[in-house]
Image (spheres, rainbow, N blue to C red):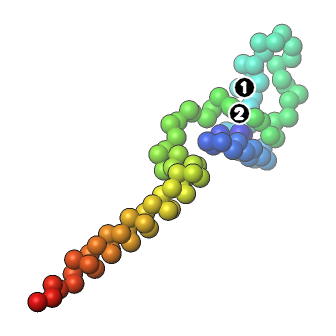
C-alpha cells in the first residue's frame, strides 16, 4: 500500500495476513483487465501499490508552515526581536520619573 504524504511518498509492506487486503487485491486484479491480457492473477499480492485508495486531502496549515524553512527562519528571528523590543519598552516605561 502506498501512503501519500505531502512531499515524501513511502511504501508500507503488507504480509498478506489481512483478509481485507487480500480481498481488495483480488477485486483490483479482476477490474484491472483493461490491457487485454491476464487479469493480474499472477501479480505479487504481498506488496500491492494502491494509489487510488488514498483520498486527496488538503494540506494542513501547520504542515505548510513547518515545510517552509525560510518562513521558519524569519519567524525565529523576528519573534525574539519583537519580544525583546516590547520587553525593553516596558522596562523603560516602568522607570520612575526623577524630580
Residue sitting at x 21%, y 81%: 94
Circle 2: is it few (<14), some (14-19), or many (20+) Cα within 10 Å?
some
Under tag 1, what secondary structure? helix
Circle 1 residue: 28
Q: Is residue 24 left or right of residue 45?
A: left
Camera-side residue of 92 and 98: 98
Q: Nearer the viewer, mark 2 or mark 1?
A: 2
The reply, left or right, for residue 45 in relation to residue 72 is right
- Can residue 19 be seen here? The reply is no
Q: CA distance from mark 2 to mark 1?
A: 9 Å
Coordinates of residue 62 in the picture (x, y in percent): 48, 50
Residue at the spot 43% in from the left edge and 66% down from the top edge: 81
For residue 88, above or below residue 5? below
Horizontal and vertical percent position of residue 13: 77, 46
Residue under label 2: 50
The answer to whether the residue labelled 2 contacts the one labelled 1, judged by CB atoms less than 8 Å apart, is yes
15 or 65, nearer to the observer: 65
**Outermost residue toward the left?**
99
Q: Earlier in the sequence, mark 2 or mark 1?
A: 1
Helix, strand or loop at label 2? It is loop
User: Callout 1: few (<14), some (14-19), or many (20+) C-alpha neighbours within 10 Å?
Assistant: some
Residue 48, image x, y percentages: 77, 36
Q: Residue furthest top?
A: 36
70 versus 52 height, above or below: below
Amino acid at each position: 500500500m502506498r501512503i501519500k504524504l505531502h512531499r515524501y511518498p513511502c511504501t508500507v509492506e503488507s504480509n498478506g495476513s489481512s483478509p481485507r487486503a487480500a480481498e481488495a487485491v483480488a477485486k483490483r486484479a479482476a477490474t484491472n483487465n483493461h490491457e487485454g491480457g491476464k487479469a493480474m492473477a499472477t501479480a505479487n499480492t504481498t506488496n500491492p501499490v494502491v494509489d487510488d485508495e488514498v483520498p486527496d486531502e488538503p494540506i494542513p496549515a501547520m504542515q505548510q508552515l513547518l515545510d517552509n524553512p525560510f518562513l521558519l527562519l524569519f519567524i525565529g528571528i523576528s519573534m525574539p526581536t519583537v519580544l525583546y523590543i516590547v520587553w525593553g519598552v516596558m522596562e523603560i516605561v516602568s522607570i520612575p520619573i526623577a524630580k
